[in-house]
Amino acid sequence: MLAISPYELLALDAGAALQAALHCPIRIASSPAAVTFAAAQANLHGDWLAIGTATAKALRRSGAASVQTAEPQNAEGLLALPELSDCQDKPIGLITAPDGRGELERVLPERGAQLHIAHVYRRQALPLPESAHRSLRGLGPDSAVLVSSRAAFAEFWRQLDDAERDKISRTLCIASSVRLLDYLQTLGLQKLRLAAGTQSTAMLAALGEAIAAHEREG
């Protein structure tokens, strides 16, 4: 297991933007990190929508009265909920980071929502350590890459050299959403599989299915 983090997370003082988001009747948290940084600034009471069970658990620990998730556990799944399908003139608060869940920030205003965005943290790029580059260059044919964040993968990809990119492009890659899979295709990744969501169980299940399919094909 090779875990590579291409950035660190730093708090942003959301101030009035966070209060405006929290006073909306519909509130959305985009990630566990968003919950952590928001909870350090305000009381996260009331009812919430969350992308994924990890975010839902973080909200409950931070005082949320109720939390609803969707299937699949990604932005597309959340946008299919009745609360967000018909949101004309509804005030909706979104707790996130800059360049976070861009699909929500794009689609909800298109549906007529009054979207109040609170950026409670930001991503600071970190240089990949040389040990990570060595490990990437040593990846064997049975390796796989699990991707649940476009922002994380984009920064990771930016720091790779041509040889490392070529190796990753020929490595089995599990994407957590259709949008992410499409993005990876634009980068030239060739062996892509779609997971049912961002949670680890869904990602590993997709990996298992890919391995089983490969074994059936001989």
Image (spheres, rainbow, N blue to C red):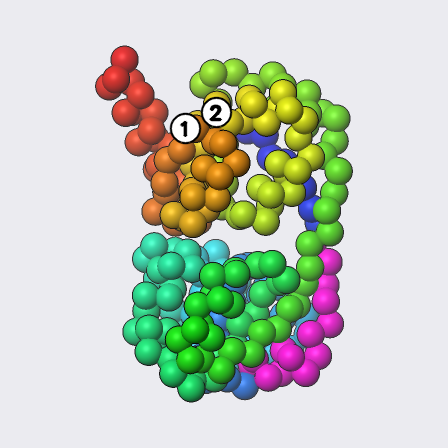
Percent x, y for residue 213?
28, 25
Q: Which mark is residue 191?
A: 1
Q: Residue furthest top?
A: 218
Q: Which residues are magenta?
A: 9-22
Depicted 69 relative to depicted 151: above or below: below
Q: Position of residue 53 (x, y in %)?
A: 43, 57
What residue is at 48 percent from the left and 31 percent from the top?
189
Q: Residue furthest left?
A: 216
Query: 93 or 55, which lies in front?
Result: 93
Residue type pointed to by label 1: Lys
Q: In the rendered image of this protein, does residue 205 appear above or below residue 104?
A: above
Distance between mark 2 and mark 1 Cα atoms: 6 Å
Q: Quadrant of the N terminus?
A: top right
Q: Is residue 201 visible?
A: no
Residue 58 relative to residue 37: left or right: left
Q: Quadrant of residue 119?
A: bottom right
Reading the image, the residue beneath label 2 is 171
The quarter of the picture where the C terminus appears is top left
